[in-house]
Image: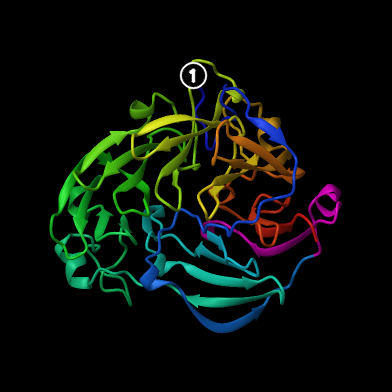
Amino acid sequence: MKIFLLAIIAIAVGCSSPIVQQIDEPKPTVTETSSLTVSPTVEPTLTMVPTTLVLQSPIASSNQLSRNREYISILGLEGRNLIEHLAWEPDGKSLTYAVQGEWGTNDVPYVEPKDWNWQKFDVTTGQSFHLSPPESTLSLEIKRALDICASEPMEGDECGRVPILWESPYSDHVIYNPISRGENTWLAHKDGTGAMELESVFLTNNVQWSPDGRWAVISDYAYRAPGMEVHLLLDLTNTAVYALDALTGHDSEFVSYLRPKFSPDGRYMAYAATADPDIELESAYGLFIMDMATLKSEPLTDRFGPFQWSADSHGLYVFDNAVRIEYLSRIEDTIAMRKAALYYIDISDKPFEERLLFDDIDFYPHQSSSIWYWAYSPEAQAISMVGLSPELELGILFLFR
């Protein structure tokens, strides 16, 4: 019997290797990516309340500090403090992040961005500024009509703890769980009309929307180890729901937290999976790319780890081997520091071209879902994430200074 544990399990897909060469890094403007979808009309507002951070002395390994690299600590994480959003500003001079501040009764988290602790960190001054959180585009009346509000309002919040609510920044759709319907997931328009239950969709953990407003990827809890998810592709034009594994023939059963991501132009979707789930090897996992016009997929790279689209949609950054492996690994291998490398995968022509940007990067696989949120800035040549230090903290590693 397979062992089902907490986290991303595997690495590389067995496909033919693209051309690999080490060259200077491309510098397209970075795409801000995260599991959070924030409407462009409700961006967090800077309140300009500076908080001078005490920047700890670099505590990563000596290699992390060599080769003109610099590591700084931004925020220590404890208990239920989890990263929910992480994105560089286009100029690479500041970093926006949001933290899950507390959990409620029965370990139910705050799922609405308005309830998170938003901060902007200025890398030049070392100061952090509080941001006013984005507000929901749904009125209290519509939330009540859709049965989204909790049965007992909380102090200072008439709607109370919302269990599931994801609002599209590209269309007038929302995906939510009505209180009285248990685990079932519904779709509606933002004005409350057209509410309908989605077939075979429940226990939704995350929703990502395509920039053209047509598609949504819904990540559902997989009833196994924490973090394991089943990904479903929803066509918003006709409400058809496709199981991603069945649609592609690729298995993402043991790929935790590395959720599919749409390209900024909406033409493609990248996702992590294996083409042969019967081969129980780490090397069976990698990244694939789907053409959203045809819904046809093909191997993208046998590199495996957190990935991020470039702003021009011409390629992806992949932090290869920066994963926590719990399946097919010994405990000592699961918690041990791993060597990672940053690649750029150019999809503008075939065969896809891999460019090694930086290698020999120390990654510490902490037992926290926060390690799967990362952001790379080609302008700053810096990675921000949890896992760059032996301590459980959010930090920034400047790869060349």
Quadrant of the drawing holding the C terminus: bottom right
- Please state the horizontal and vertical placement of residue 248, each as a whole percent of the image: 38, 28
Is residue 253 in sight in this rendering?
no
Residue 313: image x %, image y %?
A: 50, 49
Give yes or no for residue 177 being in the magenta stretch. Answer: no
Residue drawn at point x = 45 percent, y = 66 percent: 116
Residue placed most toward the observer, 226 or 38: 38
The image quadrant of residue 10 is top right
Specify whether 50 is left or right of 83.
Answer: right
Q: In which quarter of the image is residue 166?
A: bottom left
- x, y (%) of residue 200? 24, 36
- 374 left or right, relative to 146: right
Is the residue 117 above or below the residue 400 in the image? below
Instruction: Specify whether residue 63 is in view.
Output: yes
From the viewer's side, name the closer residue of 191 and 177: 191
Identify residue for label 1. Answer: 276
Magenta residue span: 57-85
**Secondary structure under the numbered disc 1 in the rendered image:** loop
